[in-house]
Image (cartoon, rainbow, N blue to C red):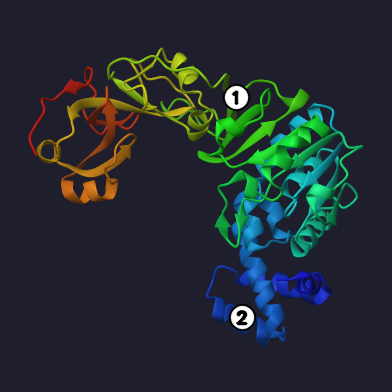
Amino acid sequence: MDTDGLAVLRTAEGQAALATAADLAGGDPLAAAAALRAGGVPADLAAAALTQAELRRHAVGKFGPDAATMYFSRAGLEQATRAAVADRRAARLHEAGVRTLADLGCGLGADALAAARHGIRVYGVEADPTTASLARANAAALGLADLFTVECGDATGYDVTGVDAVFCDPARRRGGRRIFDPDAYSPPWSFVTALAERVPRTVVKVAPGIDHAAIPPDAEAEWVSAAGDLVEATIWCGPLAEVPRRASLLGRQSRTLRAGTDAGEHQLTGAGTRQAAVGPVRRFLYDPDGAVLRAHLVAEFADTLDGTLADPDIAYVYADRAVATPFARCLEITDVLPFSLKRLRALLRERGVGRVEILKRGSALVPERLRRDLRPAGPAAASLVLTRVAGAPTVLIGHPVGDPIGSSAGGPSRQPAGGG
């Protein structure tokens, strides 16, 4: 869709077509198109309305009820910030006293709209004309056009003097492909990192896999997990920086014990430079959330459990007790044995295990191939953890805490090495 197509969708005829398309979305696309054309909707408008209705349907997961009146492109929706994450960031900016914000590379406007809802005046800049038009349409659709305006142009040439803060989400895709070289971002990483010298209160949204070495000194780097999915990282510069590293989990319940049902926001902070202590495999294994891992806060998490690692390079945390925590999933370990396909297969057969969950970290084995090789059969279930213990390939057998699918009596038993 181009700017002309968007303009047609915003006419009375386009709005009627969108309303009809919304009722047909999710069904047979050919039948839906035929129904629209039978109602007198031109073919081009019918196709545009159905595409937009389908995008709106998929956008509900990110934008909630607002998706029903917003306008999207496929690429823009994929890259847009989730509304809950954008709202949280906007609240932090507002609490820091930000009242005017330049959004360089505003995309469809997810972050700018959230900031505007907090009363912040946002000046958006977007290089792509169609995307800029979509952002303007979204501001109008949500009644925020007075607080969020969009200029189509090059973000590197925008005058940021006079604003309280800058937000930048550099484009990390080109031609549908991911860009891994920060200097190839748009705008380039060198420009992005220099923004804080011009506007101290600068905030940058980056991919969760960012190299810690690329993070500016004295900035705060925050990794955000929403409902269990690691979705992004944010760099807070200047007076906005509060701690070196932060892992923030949104909408996450305590995943260890069923009694822990507190949903909301949970944070873990630290320097991100510490190494956790190393010790033996213990009764409970904790698999940290992706935000904890990416923030390099495994040692800080281990401290909350008096936990240790079984291998200095593998981020599974072991402890003697099960504790309700939002920061990790917990398994009770019943068996520890050097990896041997033959012995593992025999053990699972002996216990009648037919349902196998396979986790891995530090192992080159392919879980689905291992599942085929094990040929599990029987009514029982088990969790297998492929990992290393003191450098040696090891398999741990257990079950999630609160879901007793194996024996929970005593600590893990250590099986002798088998052949095969």
Cα–Cα span, label 2 and label 1: 50 Å
Judge whether residue 375 can be spotted in this image. no
Q: Secondary structure at mark 1?
A: strand
Could you classify mark 1 by the number of other residues whose Cα lies within 10 Å: few (under 14), some (14-19), or many (20 or more)? many
Q: Tell which of 204 and 28 is nearer to you.
A: 204
Q: Secondary structure at mark 2?
A: helix
Look at 47% across and 25% down and name the residue there: 260
Which is nearer the N-term, disc 2 or disc 1? 2
* Residue 195 position within the rendered picture, expressed as x and y whole percent measured from the top left: 77, 36
Q: Quadrant of residue 168?
A: top right
- In the image, is residue 193 above or below residue 401? below
* Residue 69 position within the rendered picture, expressed as x and y whole percent measured from the top left: 74, 60
Give the side of residue 380 with respect to residue 418, left or right.
right
- In the image, is residue 138 above or below residue 265? below
Give the residue number, with chain letter if any, for mark 1.
245
Give the residue number, with chain letter if any, for mark 2.
33
Locate the C terminus by quadrant.
Answer: top left
